[in-house]
Structure formats: C-alpha cells, structure tokens
Amino acid sequence: MSLRAWIGRKIGLSDSKFWAAFSGRESYAGKFVTADAALQLATVWACVRLTAQAVSMLPLQLFERTSGGRVPAVSHPLTDIIAESPNDEMTGLELWEAVTAWLCVNGNAYAEKAFMGNRLVSLNLIAADQMQVTRNTDGELVYRFNDRGLPEQLPASKIFHVKGFGFGGDLGLSPIRFGVQTFGSAIATDETAGKIFDGGMMPAGVLTADQVIDDPQREALTKIMQSFAGSRNAGKMMVLEAGLKYQQLSLDPETTQMLETRRFHVEEICRWFGTPPIIVGHAAQGQTMWGTGVEALLIQWLTTGLNPFLSRIERRIRKQLLTPEERGRFYAEFNREGLLQADSAAKAAFLSTMVQNGLMGRIEARAKLNLPATPPNGDRLTVQTNLTFLDQLGAAAAPAARTEPKP
C-alpha cells in the first residue's frame, strides 16, 4: 500500500504495512528499497519499460468459437473495451502497458469494473500500491483502496485483478519486495559512485601536523578543507602553513567506477525481472550486440519472459470479464505475430511457408500485411504442387496417372 492509502486511518506501531510503505524495506547495504527508489536504477527502469511496451504493442482481439474454427467477435461489447477504449481517459495500449508495469513492480494489477445494468462498460485502472486485499469472515475477497482521498471497499466481482508469479495465494509476489538485497546494494553502489564524482574524482586524504592542535583549531581546519571539497572546487590551489601536510589517499580508476560491481548488479536485476541483459543494452564479456546468439536470446525472452504476461492477462479476461455462459464461446488472445512486425525477413518467410503449405490463404496473408484482399479464389488453400488448389490435388494427379507412353 502507498502512503495515500493510509490517509484518515489510525496508525500504530504494529502497522508494519504502513512503515514499509513509508520507508520501504531496509537492505543489508543500509538502503531502504521502495518501488520509486528501485525505478531510479537504470536497469530496473529498462526492464519494466521494455516488458510493458512489448506486451502492450501486441494487438488484442476477442474471438468467438464456431464450427469452422473461430471468427473475430467484433460485435461483442468487450471488444472495444479491451482493444480500443477501456475508459474515458485511456487507450487499450495504455491500459495493458500500465497493467504489465504494475505486474513487473508490484506483482499485481487492478482495475475497477464499471457496469451499466449487467453490461460491463469500462475498466478503470487502480494503482496497485494503493490496494489492500483481505478476506472477510465468510472467506470472500475484499479489495480496499482510496478513491480521491476517501476509503473505498469493493467485492471481488467489481475488481479485475491480474496476479503475477506466486504460490497460489490471494496476491502475486513483488520482485521489488523480495529482491530488496539486490536493489539495495545497487542503490548503495550508485550513491557511492555519485559521491566520488561529486568530489571531483578526488579521493579522501589525510592532513597531518607537527604538533597537537586544539578543538577550535580543528573546527577552523575543517571549514578550510571543506572549501576545497566537491567537484565545483576541483583545481583550487591549497595553501598550508604551520607545518601542516596533506597526503592524498590513492584510489585507482577501476575502483572509483566500480565497474565490475555495477556490471554484476545489471545482471542480477535482470534475473529478478526475467529479462536477458542484452535486451537492456548490456552485453556480457566477449558478446556482441548482433548475431544468431543474440537472436536466440530474444526468442527465449519472448517465450519465457513475455508469454507468461500475455497468458495471464488473456486468462483473467476470460475468467473475470466474460460471463460463465460466454466463456465457452468467447476468449481473448494477443496476436503474438505482432512481434515479427519489425523483422520483415522473418515475417516474409513465415507467411510464405504458411501459404505454400496450405495452412493459410492469400487473403489471410495479405490481411496480416494490411493489404487489400485479392480477386476471387484468394481465400482458397494451395500447396506447392504447381500451386494448385488443395481440394483438387487428386483431380490434378489422376490424368497424369492414366497417361501411358506411346510404343
């Protein structure tokens, strides 16, 4: 829960959720880790942003099962809500981008379902850090959150709740919460590097004197030395007197930049979000940013990184946005082929294979390229035997079988 969710409520020392929201969870590195603090790390921001954008850019469509397969359910009211306009303020892309971002950071995403009679008319996103999920005395789920400063409580039937990875409980698990040691160490490392750069890349030093100095002299020396500290004072000439000597402590550049530590943190953070480091622009030692190896990593990310998000959203739409009577006929599906849009060679090879092997008609293939339909017979399936029609394979082969060579 965020601090906003506690406005107007009594807070005691036993309210651990409030104190966690106020200061985050403390890591062994001495840093309090919250979602806002973690997102200030470039790797966390990149993992969340790239995953959310990749999921939201895929077309989402509601389909109806028919005896001949399936057809787009363009007339169903839910189609416009999930694909184009979930509410008065958001587009479909913005909704699923926000849902995926909350899943990455919080492990849960919520939206309030608004009805007109019995018909769903909109989905209104609720910030996941404002939500508190409990069960009442009857064991039913209850969702509590703040609506413009006022406490609100809704039953599970009024909430669209997408859960991330978990062990089957009421909530998904938050990577930020469980990865507090990794994120805390990365925050501490960035802070240390920043302070060194703020000091003009000048490490600490030791000031020695030939005699014992009293407290007023120590305070005066401290003020004098502070005027030479910081990046803004780099290059100033220091004048020492009364036998004072300054000895600078050595600090090599590799230690100053903490390159290996920061490289390790990039890889560790990527593990928490299931994102290959190459996706966020981090190549391992000896690895290039191009080639078949990187292509295999991208495919792996699409399979094990993005597909779980897509499947979770699809199944929650079917379970919570369709009536029990509709679940047998309708279902939502992301068009995963949208991931091939930027790779023209891969898309051309895919469509060519589907058409030449009789798995897709030319009209279907042209539709995927946003091209107009072809003349008649463009929707008939063909194979590579002179590209004849699939239902005429036997007729085409029969004359050849009856032809006999002349003596």
Image (cartoon, rainbow, N blue to C red):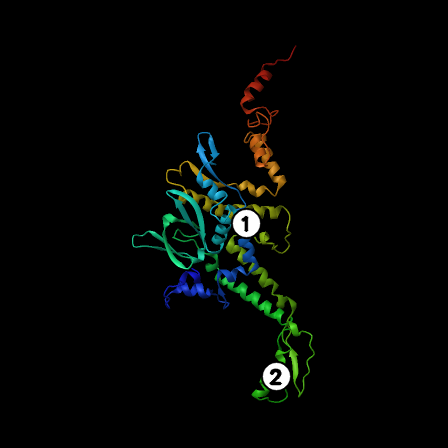
Q: Where is mark 1, residue-wise?
A: 53
Residue 247 x %, y %: 65, 79
The answer to which of 126 and 317 lies nearer the viewer is 126
Residue situated furthest top in the rendering: 407
Q: Is residue 80 above or below residue 30?
A: above
Residue 325 x %, y %: 37, 38
Residue 163 x %, y %: 43, 50
Residue at position x 61%, y 78% from top? 226
Q: Residues within 10 Å of mark 2 (few under 14, many from 20)?
A: few
Q: Residues within 10 Å of mark 1 (few under 14, many from 20)?
A: some
Q: Where is mark 2, residue-wise?
A: 221
Q: Is residue 267 above or below residue 360?
A: below
Of pointers 1 and 2, the one earlier in the residue sequence:
1
Residue at position x 61%, y 36% from top? 349
Residue at position x 43%, y 64% from top? 20
- In the picture, the disc for residue 288 is none
Residue situated furthest left in the rendering: 138
Which kind of residue does numbered mark 2 sit on? Leu
Which kind of residue does numbered mark 1 sit on? Gln
Q: Is residue 115 above or below residue 26?
A: above
